[in-house]
Amino acid sequence: MAAQALALLREVARLEAPLEELRALHSVLQAVPLNELREQAAELRLGPLFSLLNENHREKTTLCVSILERLLQAMEPVHMARNLRVDLQRGLIHPDDSVKILTLSQIGRIVENSDAVTEILNNAELLKQIVYCIGGENLSVAKAAIKSLSRISLTQAGLEALFESNLLDDLKSVMKTNDIVRYRVYELIVEISSVSPESLNYCTTSGLVTQLLRELTGEDVLVRATCIEMVTSLAYTYHGRQYLAQEGVIDQISNIIVGADSDPFSSFYLPGFVKFFGNLAVMDSPQQICERYPIFVEKVFEMIESQDPTMIGVAVDTVGILGSNVEGKQVLQKTGTRFERLLMRIGHQSKNAPVELKIRCLDAISSLLYLPPEQQTDDLLRMTESWFSSLSRDPLELFRGISSQPFPELHCAALKVFTAIANQPWAQKLMFNSPGFVEYVVDRSVEHDKASKDAKYELVKALANSKTIAEIFGNPNYLRLRTYLSEGPYYVKPVSTTAVEGAE
C-alpha cells in the first residue's frame, strides 16, 4: 500500500494538472497505516504537492491539504523543520485558510519537539508570519497561532525571540488591526505571563500587560468586560495575584465596584468584576479578601436580590465558589440573618427560575452544603443543617420534586444536592424519615440516561461509604445500598423466562 502511494506521489510530481492522480493518491492514503508511511518518510518528496497549492483550483487545494496532512504526520518534526522551511512559510501566507490551518498544525508539532523548536526560533521570517496569523479573520487560524507562540515561549530562548527582537514590534503592529485582534494578543500575553514569574516579567517589560490593565480600568465599559476575563485568568496563578496586588489593580477593581451604583452601564462589567473577586477569595483566603474588600460581599448580596437573571446567576455562582471551602462557609455564616434570606432566595430560584438558572442554583447549594468527613465538627454540621432548612419549608421534598422533572441536567443537579449532604448524619435522618426516600434512592427505573445513572450511583456511594449510615438507615437498607454499589451504575436486573414444553 505504501509503495503504491509513493508511486502515485511520483506520478503527481511528473504531471502538470494531475487531478485524477491526486484523487487516486488521496483514496490510497486513507488505507495506508501511518507506521508504514513513517518507514517510507525519507523518500517522500512533497515539493510538487506544495506547489499545487499555489494553483487557484478549489478541488486540487482541498485534495492537497488532505494528502499533505496525512503525509506530514508520518514525518519527524525535526526533518520537517529542516527540509520544509520555505514551504511552511508559504503556507502561512496562503489565501486559503485550510492551508494556513494545516501549516500551523504542523508548526504545532514542531514546537512541541525540543530538538525541532530550535529550527523555528532561528527562522525570524517564519515567526513573523505566525504572529501575523493572529490578525487573520479566521478564528481557528488565530487560535492555532496563539497556541504555537505560547508553546514557543515556554523556553528562555523562546521568550527572548518573542520579546527581545523585532517580533515584539510585529506583535504590537498586529494589535492595531482591530479590537478583536488586540484582545487576541492580550490573550497570548496572559497565557505566557501565567507560566512563571520570569515569563510575567518579560510580558510586563514589553508594556503589553500595562496596556491591558490600563484598558481594564479605563472608561469603556465593553472593553472592561472583556479585559476582566483575561485579568481573572492571570489571577489564577500566585505570581499573577502578587503582581496585581503590587500594582494596585485589585484595589482599583474594588473602587470601580464601589462606583458601580452611579454608573448606568455597570451591568456590562459588574458580573466579571464580581467573578474576579470570587475566584480571588477561593485561591487566596476568603476571610482576608472579604474583610479587605467588603464591597465584594455587599455587591453579591445585592445581585442575588436583583430581577436581572444575569446578575442573579453570577451572584449564585460566586456564593457557590465562596462557600466551597470551610473558611468561605464561615465568612458567609458571619453575615447572619442576611445569609439566611439569601438562602431562601436561592431556594426560591431553584424552584421557579428558568432551567439554566435552576441548575446554577442547585450547583451552588451543593457546594455550600458539602462537608468532607474530616471537617464535620458539631458546629459545622449544625451550620449546614440550618442552611438546608433555610432553603425552603421542606427542602428534601423540594429537591425530590425538581429531580422528577423531565430534564436530565436538572435531575442530575438535584441528585448532586442529595450527594453533597449524604455523609452528614442530620441529612441521613431526614432521608430515612422521609416516606419512600430510601426506595427512591435504590430504584434503578428512575434514571434512563448515562449521566443520571452516574449521578444516582454517586449518591448511593456517598451514603454507603458513610460511617453512620448503617446505624441510621438500619442494616437491611445498608445492605441494599452495598448491593447497588457492588452491581455498578448500569446494572440491569435479568428478566427470567420460563420455557414452555412444546413451544418453538
Image: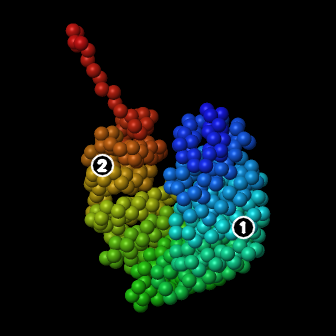
State which tag comes first along the sequence, 1 or 2: 1
The x and y percentages for residue 369 are: 43, 60
On screen, 459 above or below 300? above
Identify the residue at horizontal 44%, vertical 50% (top origin). 423
Give the residue furthest to the top.
502
Q: Amino acid at mark 2?
A: Asn
**Badges 1 and 2: C-beta atoms under 8 Å apart?**
no
What residue is pinned by disc 2? 433
Residue 103 numbered mark, or none? none
Identify the residue at horizontal 62%, vertical 57% (top origin). 103
Q: Amino acid at mark 1?
A: Glu
What residue is pinned by disc 1? 125
Identify the residue at horizontal 65%, vertical 65% (top origin). 130
Marks 1/2: CA–CA distance: 73 Å
Residue 228 can be seen, yes or no: no
Q: Secondary structure at mark 1?
A: helix
